[in-house]
């Protein structure tokens, strides 16, 4: 029988759209001995995760915990729990992840009302106002930081429009959480999900979520059963709430890692962390300018943690990415959809957002573009 050698990954610098580099102490946490998922020590740690997540989301929502699964599981959790067949749902689409939300809402049987903006631009509140005029949608869904385009759509005004229309407000914070301001209670967000592998700098595998009491009440009083057994908040709350009954086996090591990454976020401080992301983005933009490169997403709404770097005319976008990876051990992402071939997606997320990483990327680009 043929056996493989133990796998040793190459030592890359992760400057793509995620995952980002994980802090050494997060990787160490992953290698701690396992505990049972109902062990009192593990349950104590779960309580700390919930409390730290509330601080990072800036919410007092009781129903705040990490869903087992990646960011898309968090997205699915929100839709399957809140939407029933026949509900009207407004979905804002300005990139890949808005499209994914519309797909999910459709799968839940919703009548989807799309509010669309060109890729790279933000969703304007007036567009949403116009879409809800004379209607009473159950929910308005928005991607805060669109990772496919590098645009940050402000959420607060759209959330007000949702509440004025009697709708719930759902926000995707997969790329924003930990990298720029996210204020769930301050902005009146009813349902939010995120992912661990972006600005929290934990490996992919958990999806922090939070539901407001209003959203939870809707999920608790549905006419139809939640379509997904695995993601049903009415069942999951039995494990993450006070009862502590078995639902599924929690991914123990991933929860250790999330605990450590949240601890690091709070140790650094939210404001300091956001300021670091901003400073490194500005340093990158200044360096790119010297190379004759710019940012493709809408001026004034560019993400600090995901930079849509313009590909110069007659440059082979894929070849540059390949050389960055093979010769400089740097991963960056390609453009998607209409931005394919036109941008590189350069992530400066969490642990990866460091001045030395910006310098390393700019030096590599200077050498590659010189040839
Ligand atoms: C904004 C946004 N939403 C949702 C997702 C889906 O998350 P995942 O790939 O972890 O399932 C991503 C992933 O990149 C994302 O960037």
Image (tube, rainbow, N blue to C red):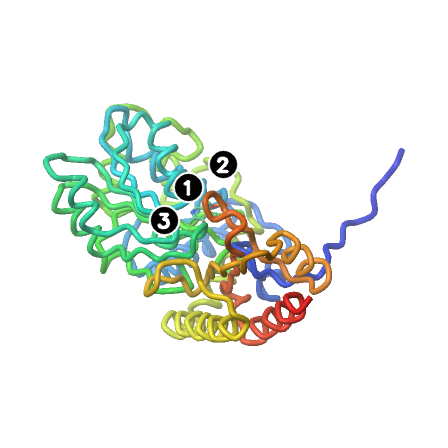
| C-alpha gap between disc 3 and disc 2 | 25 Å
Query: Which residue lies at the image location 54% right of the left edge and 76% below the top edge?
Result: 355
- Disc 3 residue lies near ligand 1 with CB under 8 A: yes
Q: Taking the image as drawn, is residue 118 in sight? A: yes
The reply to whether the C-beta atoms of the residues labelled 2 and 1 are less than 8 Å apart is yes
Mark 3 Cα shell of 10 Å, populated few (<14), some (14-19), many (≥20): many
- Disc 1 residue lies near ligand 1 with CB under 8 A: no
Query: Which residue lies at the image location 45% right of the left edge and 44% below the top edge?
Result: 338
What numbered label is drawn on residue 248? 2
Mark 1 Cα shell of 10 Å, populated few (<14), some (14-19), many (≥20): many
Quarter of the image for residue 276 reads bottom left
Quarter of the image for residue 90 reads top left
Q: Foreground residue, 302 or 229?
A: 302
Whichever of callouts 3 and 2 sits on the residue coming sooner in the sequence is 3
Query: Which residue lies at the image location 28% right of the left edge and 50% below the top edge?
Result: 123
Tell me the residue that label 3 is attached to.
172
Q: Foreground residue, 77 or 252?
A: 77
Q: Position of residue 307 (x, y in %)?
A: 47, 61
Q: Secondary structure at mark 3?
A: strand
Instruction: Give the left or right position of residue 131, taking residue 352 as reference.
Output: left
Residue 88's place in the image compared with 278, above or below, is above
Q: Position of residue 3 (x, y in %)?
A: 85, 40
Tell me the residue that label 1 is attached to.
239
């Amino acid at each position: 029988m043929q056996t493989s050698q133990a796998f040793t990954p190459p030592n890359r610098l992760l400057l793509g759209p995620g995952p980002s580099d994980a802090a050494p102490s997060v990787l160490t946490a992953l290698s701690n001995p396992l505990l049972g998922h109902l062990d009192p020590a593990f349950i104590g740690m779960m309580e700390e995760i919930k409390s730290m997540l509330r601080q990072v989301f800036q919410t007092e929502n009781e129903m705040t915990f990490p869903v087992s699964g990646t960011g898309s599981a968090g997205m699915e959790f929100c839709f399957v729990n809140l939407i029933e067949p026949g509900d009207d749902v407004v979905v804002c689409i300005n990139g890949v992840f808005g499209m994914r939300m519309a797909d999910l809402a459709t799968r839940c049987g919703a009548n989807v009302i799309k509010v669309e903006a060109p890729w790279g631009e933000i969703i304007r509140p007036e567009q949403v106002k116009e879409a809800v005029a004379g209607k009473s949608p159950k929910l308005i869904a928005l991607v805060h930081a669109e990772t496919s385009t590098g645009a940050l759509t402000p959420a607060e005004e759209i959330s007000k429009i949702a509440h004025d229309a009697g709708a719930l407000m759902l926000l995707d914070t997969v790329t924003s959480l930990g990298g720029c301001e996210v204020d769930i209670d301050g902005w009146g967000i009813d349902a939010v999900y995120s992912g661990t592998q972006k600005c929290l700098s934990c490996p992919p595998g958990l999806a922090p979520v939070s539901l407001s009491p209003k959203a939870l009440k809707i999920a608790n009083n549905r006419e139809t059963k939640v379509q997904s057994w695995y993601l049903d908040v009415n069942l999951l709350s039995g494990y993450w709430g006070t009862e502590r009954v078995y639902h599924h086996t929690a991914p123990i090591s991933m929860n250790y890692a999330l605990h450590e990454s949240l601890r690091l976020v709070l140790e650094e401080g939210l404001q300091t962390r956001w300021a670091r992301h901003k400073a490194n983005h500005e340093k990158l933009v200044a360096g790119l300018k010297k190379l004759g490169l710019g940012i493709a997403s809408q001026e004034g709404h560019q993400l600090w943690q995901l930079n849509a770097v313009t590909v110069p005319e007659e440059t082979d976008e894929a070849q540059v990415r390949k050389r960055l990876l093979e010769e400089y051990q740097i991963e960056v992402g390609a453009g998607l959809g209409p931005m394919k071939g036109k941008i590189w997606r350069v992530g400066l997320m969490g642990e990866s957002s460091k001045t030395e990483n910006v310098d390393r990327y700019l030096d590599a680009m200077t050498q590659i573009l010189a040839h």
